[in-house]
Image: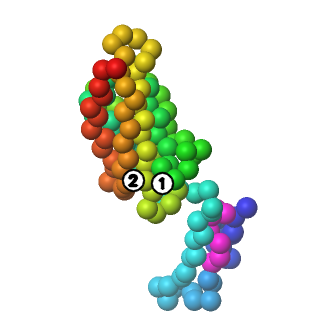
Amino acid sequence: MGVMIPNSSLYIPSVVSEIDTSKSINSGWSGISILRQAGDAYFYANVVIHDAVIGSRYWLVDNDDYSVVLASGLISSDLETITNVPSYKSPMILYLRLRNASSEPKYLQYEAISPHSKTGVDFYCRQKIQ
């Protein structure tokens, strides 16, 4: 549910909590308060995994709560980009786990952590043969 601005055709979606119409728009000022919902992300940024073994599976989660799975999948190139990874708190630490155990040669599990950043995150991987 949103808010309709009085005497206009402007509609504000429900993420806006209130509109201060006590000042006229002609005076150059109007105020809009925006509330962030509990499940909304602070920001989205890309995560890049460098030099991982092709065919490895990755699992990217919040380091404080492993039930918050941000991404998972299969590495398809030595430069894997996961786009628009959300950050639900500030600061948020990302935990990455890589594993290639389905085909020979098998690799040990690789783990790394990094703070989530608005400019993105780069993980440089050095997987070891099992």
Tally the marks.
2
Depth check: give the residue in front, 118 or 52.
52
Residue at 55% in and 50% down:
65
Residue at 39% in and 53% down:
116
| Image spot of residue 127 (x, y percent) | 30, 28
- Please indicate, yes or no, whether residue 63 appears anywhere in the rendered image: yes
- For disc 1, the marked residue is 87
Horizontal relation, residue 2 to residue 112: left or right: right
Residues at marks 1 and 2 touching, judged by CB atoms closer than 8 Å = yes
Task: Say whether residue 50 is magenta.
Answer: no
Horizontal relation, residue 17 to residue 98: left or right: right
| Image spot of residue 50 (x, y percent) | 28, 34
Residue at 43% in and 18% down:
101
Q: Which residues are magenta?
A: 13-19
Q: Identify the image quadrant of the N terminus.
A: bottom right
Q: Is residue 4 above or below residue 117?
A: below
Q: Is residue 84 above or below residue 72?
A: below
Q: Helix or strand or loop: what does disc 1 sit on? A: strand
Q: Inspect the image, locate mark 1, and give the three-letter code of the amino acid beneath it.
A: Ser
Q: Is residue 124 above or below residue 40?
A: above
- For disc 2, the marked residue is 116
Q: Identify the image quadrant of the C terminus.
A: top left
Depth check: give the residue in front, 11 or 106.
106
Q: Inspect the image, locate mark 2, and give the three-letter code of the amino acid beneath it.
A: His
Q: Residues within 10 Å of mark 2 (few under 14, many from 20)?
A: many
Residue 50, labelled with which disc? Answer: none
